Image (spheres, coloured by chain):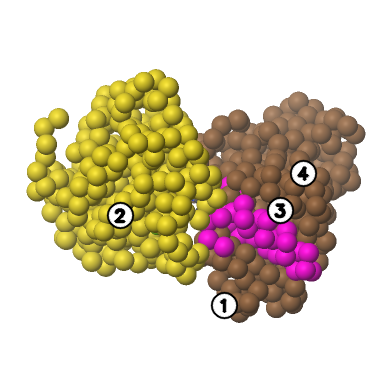
Amino acid sequence: MEKHSTEQLNAVCSQVRRDILRMVHACQSGHPGASLGCTEFFVALYFDQMKHDSSFNPDGKGEDLFFLSNGHISPVWYSVLSRSGYFDTEELKTFRKINSRLQGHPATEEGLPGIRVASGSLGQGLSVAIGAALAKKINGDDRLVYALMGDGEQQEGQIWEAAMCAPHHKVDNLIASIDVNGQQIDGPTKEIMNLLDLKAKWEAFGWEVIVTENGNEIAQVIKSLEKAKSLLGNGKPVLNLLHTDMGYGVDFMVGTHKWHGVAPNDEQLENALGQLEETLGDY
Amino acid sequence: MEKILDTKYTYTEKKDTRSGFGDGFLEVGKKNKNVVGLCADLIGSLKMGAFQNEFPDRFFQVGISEANMMGLAAGLTIGGKIPYTGTFANFSTGRVYDQIRQSIAYSEKNVKICASHAGLTLGEDGATHQILEDVGMMKMLPNMTVINPCDYNQTKAATIAIADHEGPVYLRFGRPKWPIFTPADQPFEIGKAWKMIEGTDVTIFATGHLVWEAVVAEAMLREEGISVELINIHTIKPLDTAAVLASVAKTGCAVTAEEHQFNGGLGDIIAQTLVRNQPVPQEFIGVDDSFGESGKPEELLEKYGLNAENIVKAAKKAIARK
Ligand SMILES: Cc1ncc(C[n+]2csc(CCOP(=O)(O)OP(=O)(O)O)c2C)c(N)n1
Ligand SMILES: [Mg+2]
């Protein structure tokens, strides 16, 4: 795969953000906040880091795999999948509408290319990713498994069951990231259920922990993921604390839980799109 | 132009049943100081904010930790509290089934499991969130009372009434704005079915949002000269067996209507009651062994065969089988 420049990747991000906003606007539902915040991460994975095949083989043998545990940020995933060739961008129009493959939360039932397991009920994705990483080991497949979780999602007990399990089984072909945006539905994570020191917690569970200070700067995201890869293969999984701003890229959405799961109205959409260049052509 | 139906119950306003829960929760909190609340990062969606503001010391935001919430609720009852837990129906049941089973139902704890966004009418979030199995899971549990009110007013009344009932309760309600067609001052008696319309040709047993669809279906059937008895089964367990049997003794056939799988739902328990006592033809309105999907509530009710038109067809079929 030819390498894209930072400039080219940023251009993809701008288009992905337009897609996200237009998708949630069209169905007047869905989750723009963390979708916007995680745009650089998804673009870095699919346009730079992962070896993957858009013709889509559900088994993913010989490919890097990605699992989204915080399934509500499906808009950014669908946009990035379609922009990297998994399905026609026109299909983004059908998001959350009846008879669509683009369900509100990712699903396998209608066979949308790129999705390997349903998510939406929080807390389950890391366990699945660990299972897939174990399968790769059994198969002698040296490609990697990536996973993304939310920070509010860390409040689920199953996350910590999975956290204990991966180092125990020496799952050192796994890079899990947490979208540390400090927000969840009802407010800031600090006020809802304080997570305290996530770095110390994951380290205590036996993970290599790295920190991406600015997850909205694509060069930094890529550098972190490169570093994560360099730490693998030593008996430990890697946990990446990916600091992002919820709503990044749209001035009136940034940094608040208020846009976690609310769609913009016509006027707000126009305002937001005015802040984001159309680089690859709107669907 | 759409024909105006002469329904026996009418509405001037639509409101979500979860708001009925939120308003009832505040009111019961004022009446009974033992009532406490817990919520797993969905205070806004469950409309629990008014109670939280009024009684901050009796309310616990637990974050996204539903299993933990069920355990906390069980523990609070040991100090004489009456905990109301709040999250979506999926995360109130399937997610925490064993916690409910062991710490609440088997241990006979006085916990009120309040579950919003039940069924297909949750809409765009899709199948991961649209639970259609919750009534089945909850009604299988010994000691559990299962209530599924039909509109804002009935949900509010039920929310207040369950505080006076000793024992675990599963209270199921929903997300969309829905007609308010029952009176504001209605009494709510757990376990007592409400005969909303008298009739002679067929009995429709309906629960939750589908009671409104059944009200519409009754008017459509009446225009064709068919006399419908409509019974509102707000309490699915314990079922008002006497009311069910008395009605079919008169009409000779039944239709059940619910926003749930056929498997495990209201239709199942009515069928069991009829088979044991007084077998008559029964038709089922519900979801036929499939998951839901994203879409608008009305579109989903139509696609999955849960609206008034489908109830009309089912009623005719039941009558023909007599
Ligand atoms: C098990 C479960 N409980 C509750 C929810 C409802 N819910 C959806 S997103 C969310 C907040 C998630 O917070 P976070 O992981 O920080 O994601 P962000 O708000 O940053 O997108 C909640 C409570 C859910 N989807 N699954
Ligand atoms: Mg967050």
Which residue in the protein does label 1 denote? Answer: B53
Tell me the subunit letter for badge 1: B
User: In the figure, A268 relative to A30: above or below?
Assistant: below
Q: Are marks 3 and 2 on the same chain?
A: no
Of the residues tagged 4 and 2, which is closer to the observer?
A: 2
Q: Colour of chain B?
A: brown
Which quadrant of the view contains residue B273? top right
Gap between marks 3 and 4, in whole Å?
11 Å
Q: What mark, if any, has residue A211 been given in the picture?
A: 2
Are discs 1 and 2 less than 8 Å apart at CB?
no
Gap between marks 4 and 1, in whole Å?
34 Å
Of the residues tagged 1 and 2, which is closer to the observer?
A: 2
Which residue in the protein does label 3 denote? Answer: B170
Amino acid type of the residue tagged 3 in the rendering: Tyr
Residue span colored magenta: B62-90
Q: What mark, if any, has residue B203 been given in the picture?
A: none
Residue at image location 34% in from the left, 53% down from the top: A241
Tell me the subunit letter for badge 3: B
Amino acid type of the residue tagged 4 in the rendering: Leu
Gap between marks 1 and 2, in whole Å?
37 Å
**Crowd class of label 4 (few under 14; some 14 to 19; many from 20; radius 10 Å):** some
Q: Colour of chain A?
A: yellow
Amino acid type of the residue tagged 2 in the rendering: Val
Q: Are marks 3 and 1 on the same chain?
A: yes
Of labels 3 and 1, earlier in sequence is 1
Which residue in the protein does label 4 denote? Answer: B141
Q: Are marks 4 and 1 on the same chain?
A: yes
